Image (cartoon, grey):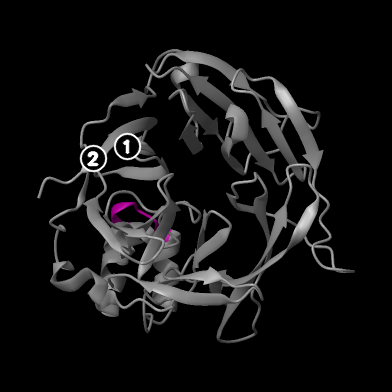
Amino acid sequence: MSLLGSLWGGELGGQLRDGIEISNVPLLEIGVAEGENPYLFSKISGAFLLDDERVVVCDGELVELRVYGRDGSFLHRVGGRGEGPGEFFQIDAVWPVSDGRIGVWDAGNLRISTFSAEGELVSAERVKIEMQAGRPRNLELFLGSFDDDDVILASVEAGRASSGVAADQWTLGRFSLDGDPQGLLGQLRGFRRMVGSPLPFTPIPSVAVLGDTVWAVDGYGPEIGHLDADGNLQPAIAVPTVDLETDEAWSLLREELQRRDAGLFLQLMDRLPPPDEIPQIGGLLVDNASQLWVKVYDPSVDALWIGDPLLPGAGGEWRVVGSGGEARGAVQMPDGVTPLAITEDRLVGIARGALDVERLVVHRIRPGGG
């Protein structure tokens, strides 16, 4: 099935009449520039709400989880740096598991751990990395979880070419929480590189799981696809494209790098030819109402050289799409907010203050009023 961009009708240029709104003022903020240690963050790399609205936050730099009450009060820490059960070499992903548990993927220890919401270790299992007979792979990325708590882990093979552009290859496998392989899911093209170096406007793959279907964005086009039974990406839903010329996008990136005084990247820009095209989608998330959230690409925040390559850029325009391709609404993300997790009526994200201090924010989501 292929659903055309005309699903959005004449409303592409602005807010949909029945759009979705995110409150500009957060319901909850956690994090301070100065103060008590439990409220200081080094690098927020993941967060979500438990069913009772307690907040789980991962500080990737300190390699620990923190759990906060629904009022933002600190409750307890989970984990810490180490190699033993309940400890982490690194935290690459954190996500909700059934029965109110917390899942953690540690690629350095090749281990999936689960904890109770109170911080007690429930399981810690090393993953068997032989995803293909006779062909072991290193697993680097966590890309999502299924309804039965199986997870998607991916290996990355860097694109190499003596000249021209080569794309990475991401191989996706399905694993149980016990670390047992459940089969290959397919492959996606990853970052595009020139002489080994990722290009600033490389498309960055994003994956979302709805039920037992793996949806993904792979490539420059404005389509969301799903992996079929043979592991091939089948374009299925077309979303609005960004109306931006490549030379204008190149200029926007240069201006942002100059603002950040990113001298090394500016030097690289001088050596690279301007791109022939730019990506159309800057991020893909899924909420618990079986809706896909699709970010319209913004070169000033979504370019690879600007932020975390595995998180969407802050702010910007998003489209909300049903799994059948129906347009559910258009929404403006609050300025400076990077979304991490979405429920039917809450958005959990990262915000940065004037001193670039990170804090965790929770915003209300509600149907638009017109």
Q: Which disc is residue 366 wearing?
A: 2
Q: Residue furthest left?
A: 370
Q: Residue furthest right?
A: 134
Task: Work out whether residue 196 can be spotted.
Answer: no
Query: How far across and down, in percent of the image, does residue 154 sit?
Result: 67, 59
> Dot 1 corresponds to which residue?
345
Q: Which residue corresponds to the image point at 40% horizontal and 79% vertical from the top-left?
A: 2
Query: How far across and down, in percent of the image, does residue 38 sit?
Result: 49, 17
Query: Which quarter of the image is occupied by the N terminus?
Result: bottom left
For the residues marked 2 and 1, what is the alpha-carbon distance in whole angstroms? 6 Å
Task: Work out whether residue 325 can be spotted.
Answer: yes
Few, some or many residues within 10 Å of mark 1 (<14, 14–19, 20+): some
Above or below: residue 250 compared with residue 63:
below
Tag 1: amino acid:
Asp
Indicate left or right for 130 with 225 as reference.
Answer: right
Which corner quadrant of the image does residue 24 belong to?
top left
Tag 2's secondary structure? strand
Segment colored magenta: 257-263
Q: Is residue 350 magenta?
A: no
Mark 2 in CB contact with mark 1 (< 8 angstroms): yes
Tag 2: amino acid:
Arg
Indicate left or right for 219 with 175 as reference.
Answer: left
Which corner quadrant of the image does residue 135 belong to?
bottom right
Q: Which residue corresponds to the image point at 68% horizontal and 54% vertical from the top-left?
A: 140
Above or below: residue 140 compared with residue 156:
above
Q: Which residue corresponds to the image point at 15% horizontal and 67% vertical from the top-left?
A: 11
